[in-house]
Image: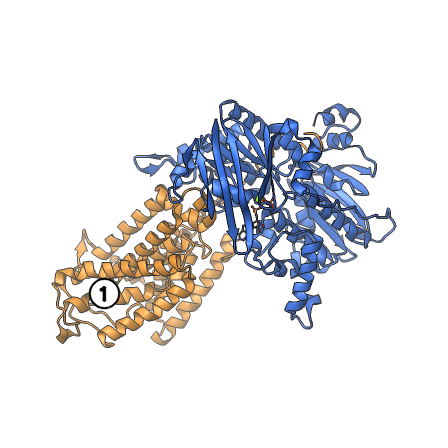
Amino acid sequence: MTGTPTVATAPAKPRPRLRLARFRDLALVPAIVVLLVVGAIIDPVFLSKANLVNVLQQQTELSLLVLAEAIILIAGKFDLSLESTIGLAPALALGLVIPSASHGLGTEWPTALAIPLCLLTGAVIGAFNGLLILRFRLSAFIVTLGMLIVLRGLQIGLTGGQNLFDIPPSVLYLGNATWLGLPASIWICAILFAAGILALSFLRAGRAVYAIGGNVDAARAAGIRTDRVVWIVLIIGGLLAALAGLLMTGRLGSVAAAQGQGMIFTVFAAAVIGGVSLDGGKGTLFGALCGVLVLGLINNILTLGGVSAQWIQAIYGAIILAALILARLTSGKAQD
Amino acid sequence: MTAVTAENITKRYGATTALDHAGIALTTGETHALVGRNGAGKSTLVSILTGLQRADTGVVTFDGEPAPPLADRDGWRQRVACVYQKSTIIPTLTVGENLFLNRQQSRRGLIDWRGLRRRAGELLDRYGVAIDPATVAGDLTVEQGQLVEIARALSFGARFIILDEPTARLDAAAIERLFERMRDLRASGVTFLFISHHLQEVYEVCQRVTVFRDARHVLTAPVDELPHDDLVRAMTGDAPVVASAARGHANDGPVVLDVRGLTLADRYEDVSLEVRAGEMVGLIGSGSSGKNALAQTIAGLLRADGGTVTIAGTTPRPGSVPGALDAGLGYLPQDRHREGLVPLLSVGENATMTITKRLGPIGIALPARRREAATTMIDEYDIRTSGPDQPVSGLSGGNAQKVVLARALASDPKALVLVSPTAGVDVRSKQSLLAAVAKAAAAGTGVLIVSDELDDVRDCDRVLVMFHGRIVQAAPKGWDDASLIGAVEGVRAESSHEEGLKE
Ligand SMILES: Nc1ncnc2c1ncn2[C@@H]1O[C@H](COP(=O)(O)OP(=O)(O)OP(=O)(O)O)[C@@H](O)[C@H]1O
Ligand SMILES: [Mg+2]
């Protein structure tokens, strides 16, 4: 190089660094252990199998929403409308199959269609979100906030604001069956989480989700069809929310007009406490699952601890905020 | 035989014509340079040749066949690999995964992570890049990131490789290694399109050169038939040469930047230096010398383990960027994309960000005054843009760079720290940028230029050399290149002449 002499160097030595990243996944495990100990001290009933199974089963619907939201967040998008999908999807599906006497829509399609119709509704909602976000380049935040309101309104309009009680047996089965000694819903969640974890860490398409959330342009340059992947992720999100709706309907034996309302804060809190970044590209499904378990245990301990029903919401919310602060402090990174 | 052609390419962005019936033809096995001033349309051509964007008119062919449709990403990837000017590293993934993104090898349908790490390690070794593949890419330095991109592009096995300003962020040893790899690949028949503002590199590795000016093709010629001055003339047309501002030698002003005994483990140790008002001081060193970490510490981006930084008499809280700025520091960061610009804001807003106080009363920035200030800057720094309202995300790499520098100078800082101020800037703009810096110094700013290019520090009153985290030499004006290069490489100054000249 003549002309402009530049300066030579020896290659920089890699600085040794602790592989903390590897353990970040397990960050919440100690918290779960502490909660188990605290629970056991507060009430001996806490550690009984019946109570623990109960805790898990109550968290199944939340955990499916968190699973959906975590994947969507990792892809760098948002979906606030999940909390309305969990109500509308089963309500619409039931409305189509139950008689008008039970507040159905009068179509009275075969009841066997209830489950497929519900899942289809969820997928369609996800696809529609995707259409608005990807085709029309609208902000995911504002689109899904709008959808949250529209979908809830649709449910109230379709059902006349009534709770639906005439639940088809297939849905009831899902919410109440026991497989190998555990409620079916727990099995379903466990299997879906396992599949999700496997897919996101070992499939090329799963890694593409991370790449898109980390830097869309770079992902596109690497040949990833970014829009298609995000679209599929949003559809999966809607599907999972609809499934959560089925489990909730089956477990409670009815679809309330407000089913799922207010859940989205808890969903985001669980994901963020579990280490999923709202900025995209960061976090794991295992972490998100731990986030769900932490919140579920806290809720259960508050109930067992005899906190009065009027106060439980405020205290639960405050504890979630405290947990967010703790998660921020222990991870040392800004939650963005 | 022609490997790649682009004919009659036109590309418009709104009112801007980035390419105007321009074209290029590459012969199989040649290394072909593409040069032109900032905003001439080089990177736009790259995005069309790699299928990221569709040209408004014109055709691209590979080996005589028309290019695949835009949606066929795999088709494009088989034909062409590219190091883009803008980083395409995904900061949240590991280096290993970045290297094999979207082509991770799988066993029975599942990604084989162990194998991926091993192959990533081999790949990095082959390019002499000492990075652990398990490192998260966001933790890499700018140079390391660039090396990862290069290693990745060369590893695809494509027969046509585009390198868009790969050397702008590399030091000499890394550049030499890159050129060796390029020569090897060329010997095996790989065709290269090489873009750089360092014209000497064009003569070093390329056989032919194409010049673009103002979105048009100007000429294509073998490099032997086009002497350096003719090449510059082809690039610039008849653009006037900017005379550098006459500047008295200043060493009696007050000290505006005082660094005392600064130490940061593993980066630099016990560094002291002073810059006086009106003085220009150069700080050069290789990639591992710690000079960039030192600059970041002065700006408050890093926090030293010990020692003090005093800016114009005040000692800002260590590790606080606002503190350093309030004390009167102007700073041009090395990583413009991450630390420099707000991509969606306009050129005007980005350029005047540091001087909003002067644009109107009580925190209101009057749009008319902002426009006026921005327009002055655009003229003064020769920024090619459709106007102050264009978002900076639409600027060419070198022009974005000028916006950051304009902004750093605009606030009339007492002390100014510039890291590699001319990286990615074309030959002519380099002169006008450095002239603007000299003008600021003549007006009483104390300037510290941190760089690995001697041309950046030619105007300086003194040049300091850093090696392995320490300042090893201070040369007053009148230094000779060879001895400085010797010191930079860690060879003793007296015996270094031969070593240095080889550069
Ligand atoms: N996305 C965009 N939107 C608007 N204008 C753009 C966009 N991309 C490029 N341009 C404009 O097109 C012109 C050519 O830009 P290009 O990036 O090709 O220049 P370049 O030759 O690569 O310059 P440099 O040497 O600075 O990298 C510039 O004037 C730029 O402002
Ligand atoms: Mg460019």
Q: Classify residue A298 as left or right of residue A192.
A: right
Q: Which residue sits at x=18%, y=67%?
A: A94
Q: Looking at the image, is B89 positioned above or below residue A318?
A: above
Q: Classify residue A110 as left or right of residue A134.
A: left
Q: Nearer the viewer, residue A153 or B125?
A: A153
Q: Looking at the image, is B461 positioned above or below residue A68?
A: above
The percent position of residue B338, horizontal first and vertical second, equals 57, 51
Q: Nearer the viewer, residue A116 or B271?
A: A116
Q: Which residue is mark 1?
A: A90
Q: Classify residue A104 as left or right of residue B417.
A: left
- Residue B14 seen: yes
The percent position of residue B318, horizontal first and vertical second, equals 68, 54
Under mark 1, the amino acid is Pro
Q: Farthest residue toward the right?
A: B252
Mark 1, secondary structure of its residue: helix
Chain shaded blue = B
Q: Looking at the image, is A113 positioned above or below residue B450?
A: below
Q: Which residue sits at x=35%, y=54%?
A: A231
- The quarter of the image holding the C terminus of chain B is top right
Q: Looking at the image, is A274 positioned above or below residue A101?
A: above
What is the display colour for chain A? orange
